[in-house]
Image (tube, rainbow, N blue to C red):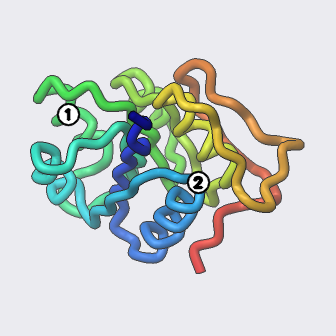
Amino acid sequence: MPDSPTRISIVDDEACVRTALRRLFCSAGFQVETFASGLEFLDSLDKQPADCVVLDMNLPNFSGLEVQQRLTQANRQLPIVMITGRDEPGVAHRVMAAGAFAYLTKPLSEQTLLEAIAAATHAAPPKSKGASTKTAQTVKEPTPIKEHDDEHLSTN
């Protein structure tokens, strides 16, 4: 019996980011669910369990870090790839110390994001179409990744 596709949950309040990430992950063979808020995502967990979550740091109502803390309090062992458009001092350390697998800053490199997901879920990293490997970084240990590659995920 073939393995089912890895299920990725995307939690971001920006519709254009959710759409772009959904397209990227679907083209890489992942099963994808999107959520506009942390509360919407947390409410869905019993019905739609995920293998990994791509979680925006800056969400309405409560932050990605608060979503991460609620997952921990609920004893949910879920790999988290935290993404942010506002890289503030000390945040990466707090997120990683709280157990996130990776911390990525926007604009996102498609290949780095796919490699972070693959490493977090222990799957082979799919190669995104047109992605360059010259500066791609594989996440082997939970460390912050700040990607400043010239090939970034377009949100248009």
Q: Residue at x 58, y 49 (%)?
A: 105
Residue 153 falls in image quadrant: bottom right
**Residue at the bottom extreme of this rendering:** 156
* Mark 1–mark 2 CB contact (< 8 Å): no
Residue positioned 52% across, 39% down in the render: 117
The residue at the point 20 percent across, 28 percent down is: 76
SS assignment at label 1: helix
Q: Position of residue 42 (x, y in %)?
A: 16, 48
Between 57 and 71, which is closer to the camera in this rendering?
71
Q: Is residue 17 above or below residue 147?
A: below
- In the rendered image, residue 45, in percent from the top left (x then y), is placed at 16, 45
Looking at the picture, tell me which residue is in the foreground, 49 or 15: 49
Q: Amino acid at mark 2?
A: Ala
Checking the image for residue 71, the label placed there is: 1
Mark 1 or 2 closer to N-term?
Answer: 2
Mark 2: secondary structure: loop
Residue 133: in sight, yes or no?
yes
Q: Is residue 91 left or right of residue 116?
A: left
Q: Nearer the viewer, residue 16 or 131?
A: 131
Q: Amino acid at mark 1?
A: Leu
Residue that badge 2 annotates: 28
81 relative position to 110: left or right = left
Q: CA distance from mark 1 to mark 2?
A: 26 Å
